Image: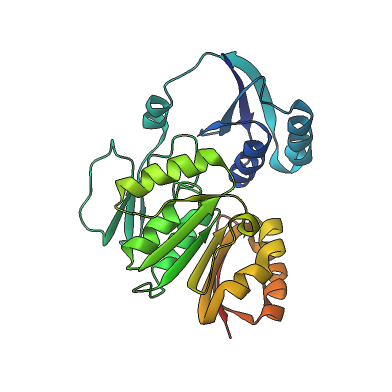
Amino acid sequence: MDYLEFKIKCKEDFREILIAELAEIGFDSFLETEEGIDAYALESELDRDAFNQTIESYREAGEIILTEGIMPKVNWNEEWEKNYDPIAVDDLVYVRASFHESQPGFRHEIVINPKMSFGTGHHATTYQVLRLQGEIDHQGKRVLDVGSGTGILAIMAHLLGAKEVEAFDIDDWCVDNGNENFDLNGLSTRMGLGTIRQVNPQGPFDIVLANINKNVLLDEMKIYASLLIPQGYLLLSGFYTQDIEDLVAAATPFGLKLIQSSDKDNWAALILQKD
């Protein structure tokens, strides 16, 4: 069956938001381009009304220009090879696909074959959380990765010495891809499927990672706090710098205090610590 192809020109800040929202309404494949994203969905799986509403809600702010077409099935691995470049987070970690060569000079290396998932380290949110992870002692710790995507943050926790890493995502295609990436990087853990309430992870955890979006973070803040040990760390990202105040205000009643923040391309990341 042929795929519907949507070429979406947009501001860079809106790429990951659009991918996240489109993934929930029938889209199963994405490619980031120089001008925005290409998104693909089987016509039978696409919720057209929801798609139109999503595009309209971001059209003005994201300066969206949309082109629709039809394309036959493609070799997604080949497409990723054309469009996916390695990244380096300082000298902390080199993130590459399996078809790239290793590079010396980094403390750690992560191999990610993203396929139809996102979270490769290229986006400012993922990049910042990887960097912040490097500043926290993971040795012998229990770590929870909420909305794991490709599994990149869970893999980073493993490389930093965590004794136990639990991860889950709401999309089955992320779970499949994440487990493949876990295998590539020597993790024995398996990614769960569902929301945090459905998966019901059993705390306590020393570190909780949540790179999702503002609304989900606000809704689940109480749960994150309840899963942390005293003095445990919560790393948050997936929101804009202007949203920091709202996130900190939501976290404070649950005994979480801000100890560090960062920003990149107007996206923010936070480290909070539980009393």
Q: Is residue 225 above or below residue 157?
A: below
The answer to whether residue 154 is left or right of residue 13 is: left
Q: Residue at x 79, y 35 (%)?
A: 53
Q: Residue at x 69, y 26 (%)?
A: 46
Q: Is residue 50 above or below residue 134?
A: above
Q: Is residue 76 above or below residue 107?
A: above
- Quarter-wise, where is residue 28 in the image? top right
**Which quarter of the rendering shows the C terminus?**
bottom right
Depth check: give the residue in front, 42 or 90.
Answer: 42
**Which quarter of the rendering shows the N terminus?**
top right
Residue 267 can be seen in this image: no
Q: Residue 257 placed where, x, y %?
A: 61, 81
Q: Residue at x 62, y 37 (%)?
A: 23
Residue 47 can be seen in this image: yes
Q: Residue 71 placed where, x, y %?
A: 55, 14
Depth check: give the residue in front, 156 or 134.
Answer: 156
Count of numbered badges drawn on the protein: 0
Q: Residue 160 placed where, x, y %?
A: 33, 66
- Quarter-wise, where is residue 198 in the image? bottom right
The answer to whether residue 13 is left or right of residue 102 is: right
- Indicate the colouring scheme: rainbow
Q: Residue at x 32, y 62 (%)?
A: 159
What residue occupies the far bottom of the structure in this picture?
Answer: 275
The answer to whether residue 143 is left or right of residue 53 is: left
